[in-house]
Amino acid sequence: MILALLLLGCTDPEPIAKAACQAVPGLSVDPEGLALLEPLLTPTEGTLLAQAEPTLGLTAAGPATMAKLRAEASCEVGEVESAGSGRWAVPVTRTAPSITPDGQLGEPETTELSWQVVADDGGRVETGLKKAIAMRKSAHEAVEQDDLRRAASTLRALKKSYGDPALAVDIALAEAAFDKREYARKLQNVFVSADDVVVATLTNSGDKALSAVTVAADFETAEGPKRTTAALTDVAAGATVEVRLEIPEGAEGGVKLSTADFEF
């Protein structure tokens, strides 16, 4: 079947483009997906895909979910035009289940793709994987620079342009991390007193209840910095609660309070 498509690709790019679409290319794919795609993609893209690190979305979805997505995918090829130099511009529309932020199959979504079929590569498909990998790298760099807003924006643009359904998970994680960091600004820790323990208050000035909060107290000692923590649960939106933190032996000077972590 694949050999026949490759032979047809030299004069008719539609069948191989449709086959590649139904195999659902991504920034990374599971072993079954790779076996389907390698004979359909240009050698360069096949190699890049084989070497790609799994996205968070692919890991969350897993092979069984991806296999079901491929089985339910339907693709239509639009009007093919010459792109010059032995290339065809091939617009493809895929309708397939979406992937939810937790890696499950969701409602159907329609994805518009713009590919090229390259005669010099045996009539194989070029999906734009190299550019997509560069965008993924840019998103990772944004995370490393703590620019979570840019990371999420880049991933959304990447999903739209490249059409990897599993990126929905990566996007959701980046957006959640950004939202959590922004909400942290709404948590205030105020020192009250210190005797046997540090007494402080935590105010949740935001509009969301917190299921768990860890408050930290950082001290200076002759042996270096030391931290103690206190765990709180069920802090309502708008609530102010008391926090009691141990004072480590040898603590000197003041104490610095902070919210170490929290969960909605």
Image: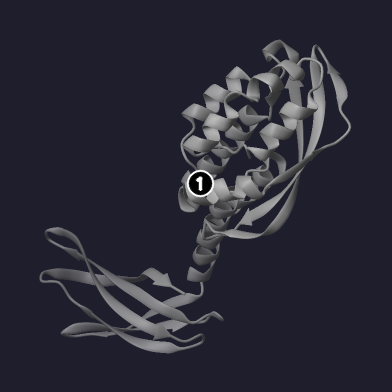
Percent x, y of residue 249? 10, 71
Percent x, y of residue 81? 88, 24
Helix, strand or loop at label 1? It is helix
Q: Is residue 179 above or below residue 195?
A: above
Of residue 108 and residue 51, the one placed in the foreground of this image is 108
Residue sitting at x 68%, y 47%: 73
Of residue 169 and residue 10, the one placed in the foreground of this image is 10
Percent x, y of residue 123? 72, 17
Residue sitting at x 54%, y 36%: 33
Q: How many marks?
A: 1
**Residue 112 quadrant:** top right
Whether residue 264 is visible to the viewer of this picture, yes or no, is yes
Q: Is residue 111 above or below residue 120?
A: below
Protein image colouring: one colour
What residue would you read off at disc 1? 58
Percent x, y of residue 83? 84, 20
Rate crowding at label 1 as few (under 14), some (14 to 19) or many (20 or more) other CA atoms within 10 Å: many
Q: Which quadrant is home to the N terminus?
A: top right
Of residue 30 and residue 180, the one placed in the foreground of this image is 30
Whether residue 147 is visible to the viewer of this picture, yes or no, is no
**Residue type beneath disc 1:** Leu
Q: Is residue 46 above or below residue 150?
A: above
Residue sitting at x 46%, y 36%: 53
Q: Is residue 103 above or below residue 53?
A: below
